[in-house]
Amino acid sequence: MTDIILALDVSTGKDALSIAKKTAPFIDAIKIGYPLVLAAGLEIANQLSDEGLPLIADFKVADIPNTSRLIAEEVFSHGFSGIICHGFVGRDSVLACVETAHDHGGECYVVTEMSHPGAVDFFHGGIAERIAGLVCETNADGIIAPATRPERTSLLRTLIGTKKILSPGVGAQGGDPAAIASIVDGIIVGRAIYEAKDPGSAAEEYSRFRT
Ligand code: BMP
């Protein structure tokens, strides 16, 4: 199954709620993070939950285990169903997010390799592969891997088996959804939907890649 996940990185709660309503029939989950939460507050999560879609908290948590756990507790007490954390911080910090997510019946996704050009400066050379190993060891639910480098995401698939892959980088960052859809469990799309003249139609276009 391939889901369409809307990255709702708009800067007002009003825009967020309006775009969520227009796109809801064509998407499977909404991901929000610093841009929207810093602008509108974490309470926006409760308002967005009216659409009845899973909400993923993209704070790319990267802290010591205790702080990571406190962040994750706050996230899950606001109705999110998933959290994204970084993997490079190491096993204990990842485990803090995974355990807190599972305690609340939620999911934890770990960033293994990012989609932007500069990601190769650090994630290549074995780091992404090591993080994929950590994902299996910590029983995380899945990874974030780049739609901009389908060959890398395919490689990461061989390391994580049937765990989920959510993949950002299509549309505005140049990734081709047709090249990645069959490899991943979710395509994350932001600007190509929320900056479109008609976000509902743009979301409907991407829904062609849903399976
Ligand atoms: P857009 O489709 O507008 O490029 O947005 C992509 C979304 O996915 C953004 O919220 C971004 O922070 C996130 N993301 C990404 O683009 N690449 C990554 O490697 C990891 C991400 O979470």
Image: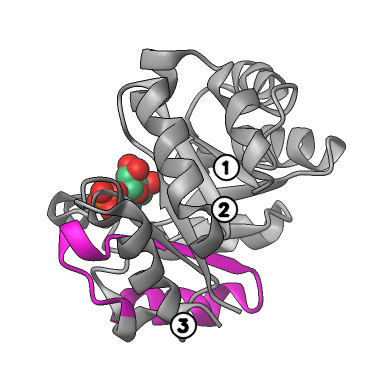
Instruction: Give above or below for 72 relative to 147.
Output: above
Tell me where residue 151 appears, x and y as whole percent: 30, 82
The mark that comes first in sequence, 1 or 2, is 2
Crowding around mark 2 (Cα neighbors within 10 Å: few <14, some 14 to 19, many 20+) is many
Q: Amino acid at mark 1?
A: Ile
Return the mark for residue 183. Answer: 3
Q: Residue at x 13, y 56 (%)?
A: 117
Q: Which residue is mark 2?
A: 29
The reply to whether residue 86 is in sight is no
Q: Is residue 187 at all visible to an observer of this figure?
A: yes
Mark closer to the observer (1, 2): 2
Q: Residues under labels 1 and 2: Cα distance? A: 7 Å
Asked if the residues shown at circle 3 and circle 1 are in contact, with their CB atoms under 8 angstroms apart, the answer is: no
- Which residue type carries mark 3? Ile
- Label 2 is placed on what type of residue? Ala
Query: Label for residue 141?
Result: none
Residue interval drawn in magenta: 151-177
Judge whether 72 appears above or below 139 on screen: above
x, y percent for residue 106: 76, 44
Callout in the foreground (2, 3): 2
